Amino acid sequence: MPDSGALYELNPSLGDVPEGLHLVAGLTGFADAGAAVTQLSAHLLGTLSHTVVATFDADVLLDYRARRPTVYFDQDHLTDYSAPVLKLYLARDELHQPFLLLTGFEPDFRWEAFASSVLGLIDRFAVKSVTWVHAIPMPVPHTRPIGVTVSGNRQELIDRMSVWRPHTQVPANALHLIEYRLQQQGSPVAAFVLLVPHYLSDTEYPAAAVRALESVSAATGLIFPTETLRGEDREFIANIDSQVAANAELGKLVGALEERHDSYMEDSPLNSPLADVDGSLPSADEIAAELENFLAFRRHGDDEGGQTR
């Protein structure tokens, strides 16, 4: 049962959690274009060391009839039940920097109580900043970098990275409520909305996960492994490009999206922080290669006992 009447139970075997960490969040629920959040969560939990800090009560927060768990049926009996999970983890990035990770299902019920519980945990661990990610479908081409809309109160990230700044009403995510409460109390918070090509929104689009990781890194300084995702993305894009090349209507659609995207970006004052003095940008693969060289150097230092943590 949840601890002290809250919606979560703290891990009783957990040691001290360092104060002043970044909190990274992503919940699967109403919208997850390109399976960006699903991939982000799976990738971080699959590649980084992590320990459970708190487990939220699914029986209180989840509508099982709307999002039914799965069971595995083996000919004549059940062998597995996949319970829904929403947890706060203590994790470490590629450079062993600790951070908090909130991930799992988006609550269907008790949003105000959930927000209060998360804000309580943020206060309990003296969280330095909160960064969260979600993704929506947009009429943009896959042949251009995935853009983001940034909200929150970290103006430096908004000025540097936000390519679309609408005046509009949108369906809320439970993390929107937490962001709103953090803004009210003046705590650092940034949300990245990934603008995923609408015709790829129902696929597992690796580029969306890479962009999510890059966005979190820009906000927190945390470093994540991306080489596997980038390799998957190259294969994915090659397949998409072959389909577009073989279909005149698809080619026409992508071409029209490219023209509209490029026209919009020509009028945008946004400059990438990665641009050289002449305005040119390194490719994603060049950036990844430089990062891998840096990490290889750090790992070599670890082997020789030379790293200071």
Image: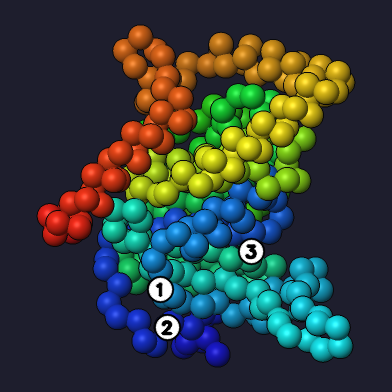
Identify the amino acid type marked 1: Thr
Viewer-nearest of discs 1 and 3: 1
Per the image, the residue denoted by label 3 is: 106
Query: Is residue 255 left or right of 19 when viewed as pictured?
Result: right
The residue where tag 2 is placed is 11
Q: Label 3 crowding class (10 Å Cα cut-off): few <14, some 14-19, many 20+?
A: many
Q: Is residue 214 left or right of residue 304?
A: right
Name the amino acid, label 2.
Asn
User: Which of the 4 image quarters holds residue 85?
Assistant: bottom right
* Residue beneath the point at 46% across and 25% down: 283
Q: Earlier in the sequence, mark 2 or mark 3?
A: 2
Q: CA distance from mark 1 to mark 3?
A: 20 Å
- Occupied quadrant, residue 158: top left
Task: State the SS at label 3.
Answer: loop
Residue plotted at (59% across, 80% down): 57
* Residue 252 drawn at (x, y percent): 81, 17
- Residue type at the position of mark 3: Glu
Secondary structure at numbered mark 2 = loop
Q: Nearer the viewer, mark 1 or mark 2?
A: 1
Name the residue located 54 percent from the left edge and 63 percent from the top edge. Answer: 103
Instruction: Determine contact: label 1, label 2, CB under 8 Å.
Output: yes
